[in-house]
Amino acid sequence: MTTEIPLDNPRRHTVVLAATPKGTCLCRGIVRRQLGDWGVDSSLGEPFHSALLVVAELAANAITHGRVPGRGFELHISLTTTVRRGATLRIEVSDCRGDRLPVLPPARVTDGQSGRGLVLIDVLADRWGTDLRDPGAKTVWAELDLADPVLADPDLADAR
């Protein structure tokens, strides 16, 4: 396995939110604001909107399938630049249910009420997966490769 070394100090942001519908709404707003601070906004187009949709789906899954009463979920986002991929946005949502791992549903989903969140993440993200955390928790993550020279060189953001 080849490990990439970031070319810059990754920009990071972490927050713990209530495992409620309001928490998922706040999650998306926090990410929108933080991405804007990093120079990632709607002018980037599809990758920006894809990131917000991925965040919304991961947070919704955390409160629907990973909720433990009295416990919240953790959102962590980071933006790094590497030689091979350029700028990469990593979105992580951690919950307290490591016993309930996400599974990509079969191609034909018959239930009209659920089952499409991971399909969206699979389509929109360049990579996604699950990591187990101690004690008994999990992190579901997704990465989006962002092809924008401003993101690869934060000094260019001032010229924007």
Image (cartoon, helix red, strand yellow):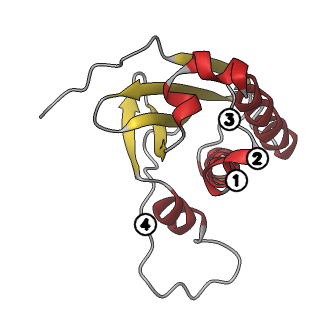
Question: In the displayed structure, does residue 148 sit left or right of residue 4?
Answer: right
| Quadrant holding the C terminus | top right
**Residue at (50% x, 35% y) in the render:** 90
Helix, strand or loop at mark 2: helix
Residue mark closest to the camera, 1 vs 2: 2
- Amino acid carrying mark 2 in the image: Ser
Q: Which residue is mark 1?
A: 49
- Using the rendered image of the protein, determine whether residue 95 is visible from the camera's viewpoint: no
- Amino acid carrying mark 4 in the image: Leu
Q: Farthest residue in the top direction?
A: 9
Residue mark closest to the camera, 4 vs 3: 3
Residue mark closest to the camera, 2 vs 4: 2
Mark linked to residue 42: 2
Residue 43 placed where, x, y %? 74, 46
- Using the rendered image of the protein, determine whether residue 129 is visible from the camera's viewpoint: yes
Residues tagged 1 and 2 counted as in contact (Cβ below 8 A): yes
Q: CA distance from mark 2 to mark 3?
A: 7 Å
Helix, strand or loop at mark 1: helix
Q: Is residue 93 above or below residue 145?
A: above
